[in-house]
Image (spheres, grey):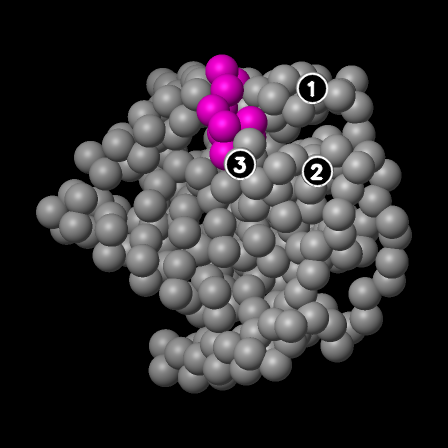
Amino acid sequence: MNSKKTFSRLGIAMFAFLALSNIFSVIFALIFEMASPGTLKNSDTQTLVTFVSIDLIGFAVFWLIVRNMPKFALKRKKVGIVKLFIYFAVCVAVSVFGSVIGTALSAALSGGDAQNYVSDLMENPGPFTIFDVVIFGPIAEEIICRKLVIDRTVQFGEKNAIIFSAVLFGLMHGNFYQAFYAFAIGLVFAYVYTRSGKIRYTVALHMVFNFVCGVLPGLLPSETFFAALDWTFVVLGIAFIAAFRKNIYFRRTLFELRCGEVFKTVYLNAGMFLFFAAVVFEFVYALI
């Protein structure tokens, strides 16, 4: 089984996903603007453009490229509600620290001029925007970054597949604001998927996370109330990490990559070079 070709093909798929999503976003945005000038100021219109471009077209392109690749069936196991709560608290905790890093880096590299597009969009979200953030987005992203990616890479080592999945998940967001916290929660989602073999758990975690951290702040009576709730989960998440860190484990697999060959096999290949090039373009553009 050629591991380097596997990761390269996934890199090509992610490159095609980003490239075509961006191209169609521009096309649809121009169509909307020509048909009704100023309509893109509406959050639901912006979300409709990204939904069709990313969740439909981008998702379909990615699936078409990887659907015939060899995949490994994970052992299916039930995850209880208490464990899901623990995983959620950990997600909130690591996302806060990742968000601080991303925000600081964005400000430093742009001289303070970069804008957090997602934060701006969620200041006054329409119903379709909320629906996409809480329902459509998590489903598409979890199927791509967990189901399609991990099923095709876990045979080369669980840890390698988890980190690779999180790297793709973080970088596909296309900006420093989201990249670090997306990478961090991506590690948690990927770990949950490898432990359970069921995508519905990570989809549910992703939906709840997006609702609590993205939508809920605008529904609560004050920022202070949300800050108290947020930091409660942060404290709980840190406590859970400290308490259960020794329970984290990774199963050995038949085609596990040796330590010395992981980086060059997983990341130094033609497909990933294309993906990284697209990512650099997106990150630079997001800073302008």
Q: Report the predominant secondary structure element of the magenta stretch.
A: helix
Q: Is residue 267 magenta?
A: yes
Spatial CA span between label 2 and label 3: 12 Å
Q: Amino acid at mark 1?
A: Asn
Q: In the rendered image, which residue does mark 3 sit on?
A: 260
Residue span colored magenta: 263-272
Q: Is residue 127 left or right of residue 64?
A: left
Looking at the rendered structure, the kind of residue marked 2 is: Glu
The mark that comes first in sequence, 3 or 1, is: 1
Mark sitting on residue 2 = 1
Label at residue 283: none
Label 1 vs label 2: CA separation?
12 Å
Please state which of residues 64 and 86 is positioned toward the viewer in this rendering.
Answer: 86
Q: Residues within 10 Å of mark 1 (few under 14, many from 20)?
A: few
Circle 2 residue: 256
| Residue 232 drawn above or below residue 3 | below
Asked whether residue 200 appears in the rendered view, the answer is no
Mark 3 is surrounded, within 10 Å at the Cα level, by few (under 14), some (14 to 19) or many (20 or more) other residues, namely: few
Residue at (37%, 22%) from the top-left corner?
A: 277
Residue 207 vs residue 87, the one in the foreground: 87
Amino acid type of disc 3?
A: Gly
Residue at 28% x, 55% y: name it: 103
Q: Secondary structure at mark 2?
A: loop
User: Mark 1 falls on what kind of element?
Assistant: loop
